[in-house]
Amino acid sequence: MRIGLSYDLKGAVPLDEASPEDALEEYDSRETVELIAAALEAGGYSVVMLGGGREFLENILREKVDIVFNIAEGRGNYRGREAQVPGVLEMLRIPYSGSDAQCLAICLDKPLAKKLVAVEGVHTPRWQVITDEEDLGQIPWDQFPFPAIIKPTHEGTSKGIRLTSVVDSVGRMQEEVSRLLDSYRQPVMVEQFIAGDEVTVGIIGNSPPRVIGMMRLLPRRRENPFIYSLEVKRDYLNLVDYECPPQLEDEVLTRIVLSSLKAFGTLGCRDFARLDFRVSPEGVPYFLEINPLPGLSAQSDLVIIATKSGWTYKELINAVLDAALKRYSQCVPV
C-alpha cells in the first residue's frame, strides 16, 4: 500500500515582513517528516512524500496513493487553513487520516469550538472576542473575571501566547490585545484565567475513541501564574516536567476523560487529537482547546504522552493510520 505524506516544512513556507516572530512555529521540520515516514515504512507501507502548498497539489495529481497521512497545517493566516489539504483530498476522493475539513476549520477557531462544547455541558472559561480596537471600549470589563489570558483566536502551538499574556487589569489587557491585533492580524480572545494544574490529553481511535494517556505540566520554577507559553515550549527540558499519569484525584481524572471524549465527539474529530484543560482548585476541569492535528515531532506533547504510556513511536503513528483505514472500506492493507 502506498501512503502519501502531506506536510508543511518550516523552510518551505514564505513569510512577509509583517509576519510575527513565531509565524513558523506550527510547521514541521524535515526530521519530523522523516521520522513519520520511517514509522510508516516500518509498518510495511511504501511512503510517497507529497509536501504542502503548490508542491502538494502537483504531487497529489501526479502520484498514485491509496491514502494520505496528513500533518499539513495549511498556508496563510486563515482560520480554515488546516482544512486546505483535506478539502483537496475530498474533492479528489482520496482517503486521508485525521479529522475532516469541517472539523479542522471549526477547531482552529477557538471561540467557536468553545461555544459548541459548552452547549454539550463541557466546562470552559468565560471569554470575549475582540475584533478591533473599538471593541475594547464597548465591553463592560468591570463584569469580566480577571486575571485573564490573551490569545489569538485561530493559532496553534502557543503562537502569540507569551509570559506576558496573563493580565490582571483592564489596562494590561488592552496592551496585550493591541499587541496581538497588530502582530497576528486576526481577532483576539480574552479568556478567564483558571489558576490550577494544566493537563493535556491524548485520544486515538473512533469506534469508540479512547484516551491513551493524560499528562500534567509541572513548572520547575514556582512562578505564578504558570502558563504553557511559547517560551516554555521552546525550553521545555529546563522549564517543565511532565507527569504521566497525572497524580490527581480519581474523580478529577474521570471528569477530564469524560470531558475529553465529549469534546472529541461534539466537534466531530477523527482518528486522533490532543486536548488541553486547566483544573481549578475545586477540581473542575475547564476545556481550553482541542488540537485535531497535533504535532508528531519527538518532542510534541502527544508523542510524550504516548511514550510515557508505554507506546513506541512506530505504534503511535500506525495506530493513527489504522484508525483511518478502518473508516475506509476500500482501503485494506495488503
Image: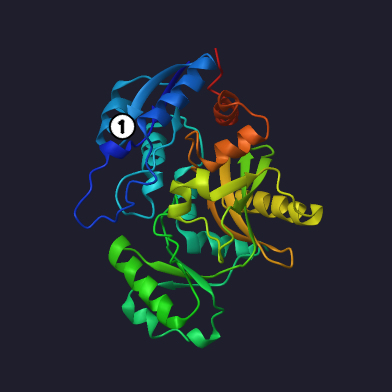
Q: Give percent across and percent down for residue 277.
A: 61, 57
Could you tell whether 80 is left or right of 145 in the image? left
Residue at 50% from the left image edge and 33% from the top image edge: 298
* Colour setting: rainbow
Q: Secondary structure at mark 1?
A: helix
Disc 1 marks a residue whose amino acid type is: Phe
Residue at 38% from the left image edge and 20% from the top image edge: 48
Tell which of 63 and 286 is nearer to you: 286
Identify residue for label 1: 56
Looking at the image, is 198 positioned above or below residue 190?
A: above
Q: Quadrant of residue 174?
A: bottom left
Looking at the image, is 278 positioned above or below residue 294?
A: below
Which quadrant of the figure contains the C terminus?
top right
Can residue 52 be seen here? yes
Check the image and name the residue furthest to the left. Answer: 17
Could you tell whether 312 is left or right of 158 in the image? right
Residue at 39% from the left image edge and 43% from the top image edge: 73
Residue at 47% from the left image edge and 20% from the top image edge: 38
Q: Give percent across and percent down for residue 47.
A: 42, 19
